[in-house]
Amino acid sequence: MSFKKHEAHIDLVTCIDNPAFKDVDGEGDGSAAKTSDDDHAGEEKQESAAAEEYTQIKPYAGMPKEVLLLYSSQARYRVPREILFWLTVACTLAIVALTITVIAVSPRCLSWWQLSPVYQVYPRSFKDSDGDGVGDLKGIQEQLAHFEFLNIKSVWISPFYRSPMRDFGYDVEDFRAIDPLFGTMRDFEELLAEMHNKGLKLIMDFIPNHTSDRHRWFNMSRMRDPHYEDYYVWTDCNATAPRPNNWVSVFGNSSWTFDEVRGQCYLHQFLKEQPDLNFRNPHVRQEMTDIIHFWLDKGVDGFRMDAVKHILEAAHLRDEPQVDPNKPPEMITSEWDLHHDYTTSQLGLHDLLRHWRAEMDGYSREPGRYRFMVTESYDYHEVEKTMMYYGTPLVKESDFPFNFYLLDLPQNSSGLWVQHLVHLWMANMPKGRWPNWVVGNHDRPRIASSVGQAYIRVLNMLLLTLPGTPTTYYGEEIGMENINITDSQIQDPAGKHNASASRDPQRSPMQWSGDMNAGFSSNKTNSTWLPVHSDYRRVNVEVQKKDEDSVLSQYRFLNALRQSELALQRGWFCYVRADASVFSFLRELDGLDRAFLMVLNFGKEAAVTDLSSIPELPDQLTVLMSTNHVSDGKVLQKSHIPTEAGEGLVIQYSISTRFNPTHSEQCYVSEKACYIRVVDILYKC
Amino acid sequence: MDENGARERKESLNGSTGPSMDSPAKDKQAVKAAVLQKDVGLLSGIGFIVGSMIGSGIFISPKAVLLYSGAVGPCLLTWAACGVISTMGALCYAELGTMITKSGADYSYLMEAFGPILAYLYSWTTVIVLRPSAFAIITLSFAEYASTPFYPGCTPPLIITKCLAAAAICVVVSVNCFSARLARYVQNFFTAAKLLIIFIITGAGIVLLAQGNTENFSNAFSDTPPSFGAIGLAFYNGLWAFDGWNQLNFITEEVKDPYRNLPLAIIIGIPLVSVCYVMVNIAYFTVMTSTEVLVSPAVAVTFGDKVFYPLSWIVPLFVVFSTIGTANGSCFSGARLTYVSGREGHMVKILSYISPKYCTPLPALILNGVLAMFYLIPADINTLINYFSFAQWMFYGLTTLGLIVMRFTRKELHRPVKVPVVIAGLMVLVSGYLVLAPIIDKPEVEYIYCAVFMFSGFLLYYPFVHRKVEWARKLMRPITIYLQLLMEVVPPEKTE
C-alpha cells in the first residue's frame, strides 16, 4: 500500500521543470542499477563520494538508507512494490464498489411486522396477576417468556383503556388512561419497557369510531357545551318513535337512541353505550390525532384500528336499502337486513386513515422503530373495499387490513375451498403488498371448534407457511377450543341481547398449566371471569411444552422455520394442486436451491396426491415435518403422497429448475428478490 | 553521464528555473533523517487523546451505566467518578511518560520496571490480539453505522459491514503509511467533528433545560440506592468509555517537548472528555426518560430525531466520523507499539524499520492492518475479544504497579511529573477489581483459553528472543533484506 517509490521519486523532482532532466531520470529508472544509483547520488547532497563506495556493497539486513537506495529501485524490487501498491488500491476500490453495488441492489428489508406473526392477547383472559379472576397487564408481563419461547415478536393487546366495560374495553371512557381492572399507567409503561427490552413490539387497539357514553366529551355534548356540541352525531327525534331513519346497530336494533338530557337522538353503530363520534367535526379529528400522538410518544409500536369502516356515515341520514325490499320496515333489526351504503366506507374515510398513517410515519424515522398500522374491516363479499386500506402506490395507508376471509373456512372442508379463500386475497391484493391471515379473534368462534380439533395443526401449518403475516389469537398455538356457556354465565353484552351471538366462548382464560384455573389466575381458589375450558388438563402450555409432538411444539417449530428460511419469509408462493381433500403449494426463492412444498389435507378423508406431473419437483420427497409425527422424515415418491384427513406435510427439497418462471399465473410474490449464495445476499431482480 | 555533472545540473536548475519555494522544501526532504518525526504538538496531543477516547459508545449505548446505577442521579455521578478515576490513571501515565520518554506506553514502562519478560508478554498479547482486534472492531462499528441508513428496520448483510470495514482499514493504514502528518490532520479533523457533535448535543440540552425540561431530573435520587455489586458493574461499563487515556504515551517519541506537552495534553484531554460525557448524558435526560434511554437502540440517534428533526441525520453522520477518527488513532498508536517492540527485539526486527521517505513505521502499520483484516473474518469478533478485556486491565494495573516499584528501584530517574503514590495504589486496586469483576460475575472457560494464548507467547520467546537461535537469524536475514528493499524501509537513525 505504500510502495510508491517511483511516483514519489518523480514527485520529488517535478519541481525541476526541465524536460531534459526528466528524460535522464526516466532513463535511469528504466535501465541498469548503475544509472539509477547515479540519480540518487545526485539527489543526496554530500553523499556522492560515499555513494560510489556503496555501489560495491551488497545489501545486508538492517542496511541504512544509503545502501538501501542503491538497490531498492531495481526492477526486481520496484515492480513488485508497485504491483502490490496498485493491487491494494484496486482492491480497496473494488471493495467499495462492491459495497455500493450491494447496497444499491438490495431489496427493502422486511420490517418487524412482516417477520413475526402477530399474536393477539385478550387482556381479560391472558393472565391474572392479582387474583381477581380477570387478566391484567402485569399478568401479560409475567408471561412474556411465552412469546420468546414461540419466537413471536409482535403482540397485539386488545383494549385496556379506562372503560365501563359495556363492550369489554371497546367502549372507552378515557383514551389516555388504563382501566384499573388491568392495572395502572405505570404497569403499562413497565410492560412496554420490558417488551422492548426483550425485542418485542406492542400493538394496541385504537378505537376511533366511538367512545363510551360515560366519556367526558359525551357528557359535555349532551349538555350542549358549545365546543363539544357536535362531537357526536345528533339529530332531532322523539323520545318514543319513530327513529330518524332505518339504520341498525351491529349488535342489533336501531342505531339511534334518544337522550333525555339533550332531547335528541344520537347515533351508535354498536351498543347504545357506544355513541359514534362525529368525524366531520375538525375538533374530533384533532382530538383523536392527539391521542395517537400520546401513545406513540409512550413508545407504542403500532395500532390496530378498530371498526374503521364505520368511522363516517352519510350526512344526509337517508334510509339504507333493504336486502329484502318486501320485509316490513319494523322487522329490520339486524345488520344483515340492510345494505350499508350510508353507514360504512363513506367518502373521506381513507383520507382520515392516511392522515393517521402520516402521523405514525413521523414516529417511524428512527431506525428499528417503524410504527405499524393494521385496520379492521369486515367487508364480506366486497373484498375490493378491504383492499382499499392498503392505500395506493403513492399514498400509504395501513400496512395491511386484516384478512378475515379464512374465517369462512368452516363453511366447507376441502382443499379447493381453502385454495379459493387464499386466492380471494392473493388475487385481489394490490401488487407488491403484504398479505396476512386471520383464523380467529375475540369476535369469532375459535377455529379449533368451528373447523374441528382435528384440523388445528394443519391450520397452524397453513398460516405459518403462507406468504405474509399470520395472526394468532391467544390459545390457537395450543389448540384451545370454545367453552360452553350457560345463559346465566353470559358476560358479553351482545350475548345478553342474543345468546347465540355471545362472544364469551372464544374468550375463556388462557390455559397455562394443569393447575387450578389452568394457571391463569394467581388466586387458585377464586373463580375466573369466564370458566376455564374443561380440557385444560390436557390442553395447556405446560404440558404441551414437554411434548415434542404437541400443537404448541409444532407451532414453535414452524414459526422458527418460517423465520429462518428466506423462501418462507419472502419467496414465491405457487399453487401446486387443490382437490376435494388436499391443498398443496410451494415456496421458493430465485437463487436459493432449498424450497418447500406443503401438502395440506383439509378434507374429510385420507387422500393420496400425485404430483408426478410437476417436473420441477424431485422424484423423491423427504418430509421435513408432518402434523402427524410418525410421518416425519419419511421419504415419499412424488407420485404417491399420502395424507390423512387433517394432516399437513412440509416437504423440503432441492431444486435446480424453479417452478415460478413457467407458472407465473399460479405464483405470487410481494417483492421479487433473488439470492446469491456465495456472498449471502439478496438483490432486486 | 557522470554523477557530479548530474548533481551540478540539478542544483543549478533548482537555483534558477525551479520555483523558489520548492527548493528549500526539497532540501529539507533530503536532510530529513530516517526517524519518526517529532511533530505532535500540544493541540495534536489533546486531539489524539480525545479522539481515541471518544469512540461510538457515548452516542450509542451509554445505557449500561444507567442500567446498573438505577437512576438519573447516580448515573451522572458514576460518569463523573469514572472521569476522576481515569484522570488519576492518566496522571500515573503522565509520570511514567515523562520519566521514560519512549514510545510504546505500557510496554516501555513494564520493560523498565519488571524487565523484558513481562514486557514481552504485553507486546505479544497487544500486538497480536488487542490492538489489531480493537482496530477491526472499531472499523466494523464504523461500517455498521455507515450502512444502517441504507437498511432501515433491519441489520445490513454481513458482507456489507465486512467490506466497508476492510475498505476503512485499507484507507486508514494507507494514510498512516504515507504521512504521519496527514494521519494527524485526519485525527484532528475527526476529533473536531466529534467534539462538534458533542457540543451540539450539549448545547441543545442546555437550551432544553433552560426551557424547563427538567422533569427527568426532579427525583433523580428517588429510587432505592443500587447495590454494591451494581455500582461496580456501572463503573466497569463507564470506565470502558474512558479507555484510551494512555494513547498519547504510545507515541511519546513523536511528541514535541514531551516533558511539557505530554502531561499537559493528559491533564487537559481527560477532564475534557469527562465533562463531555457528563454533559451529553444530561442532554439525553432532558428529552428522554431513563426508560427511553434504556430502550433506545442508539441513544444519540433517538435524541437527534427528537430534537434536531429535520436535521436528525447529522447525528448518525457524526457517529460515523467519530468511529473512523477513533480507528485512525488506534491504527496510529497501535503501530508505534509494534515498532517499539520490534526495536527491542521482541518482534522481528523489520517491524521496527521506518520508511525514510515518509518517516512512518511502514512494516508495523502494515502488520497491524493485515492482522486487523484477519480479525474481520470471524462472524462475531466482538464477543471473542471481550474475553481478552481482562488482559487490558491487568496490564494497566501492572504498569501502575511498576510506577510504585520504580519509586524504590529507580530512584535516580528524573521525574518531571510526580503523582502521589496513593493515586497509583488506588489505580492498582481499581484495575484489580476490573480484572476480576467480569470473571467473577460470569466465570467462563474462555478466560482460560485467553490466558493460555497469552502464555503461549513464551513458546516463541524462549528460542527466538532469549536464546536467539542461529538458524532463525539465518532464515530471517534474506527475508529482511528482501522486505527492506521491497518496502524501502531502514532502521531508524540515532538522532541523539
Image (spheres, rainbow, N blue to C red):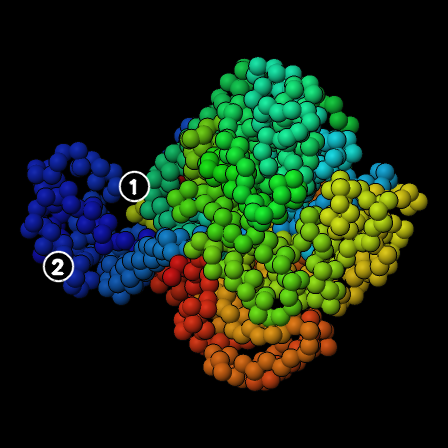
Disc 2/disc 1 C-alpha distance (Å): 27 Å
In screen coordinates, is B148 left or right of B243?
left
Q: In this view, does A669 lie above or below B277?
A: below
Q: Position of residue A589 (x, y in %)?
A: 47, 66
Circles 2 and 1 in contact, beta carbons < 8 Å: no
Q: Where is residue A449 in the image (x, y as percent from the top left)?
A: 74, 60
Residue under the point 72% across and 73% down: A629
Residue under the point 20% across and 62% down: A33
- The mark closer to the camera, 2 or 1, is 2
Outermost residue to the right: A525
The amino acid marked with disc number 2 is Glu
In screen coordinates, is A530 left or right of B9?
right
> Dot 2: what SS?
helix
Residue under the point 64% across and 35% down: A255
Q: Position of residue B92 (x, y in %)?
A: 60, 32
Q: Where is residue A160 in the image (x, y as percent from the top left)?
A: 71, 36
Residue matched to label 1: B32
Question: What label sits on residue A27 in the rendered view?
Answer: 2
Structural crowding at the residue carrying mark 2, measured as other residues with C-alpha within 10 Å and reported as few (<14), some (14–19) or many (≥20): few
Task: Give whichever of A126, B193 is nearer the camera.
Answer: A126
The amino acid marked with disc number 1 is Lys
- On-image quarter of the C terminus of chain B: top left
Task: Give whichever of A3, A63 is nearer the camera.
Answer: A3
- On-image quarter of the N terminus of chain B: bottom left
Total residue callouts: 2
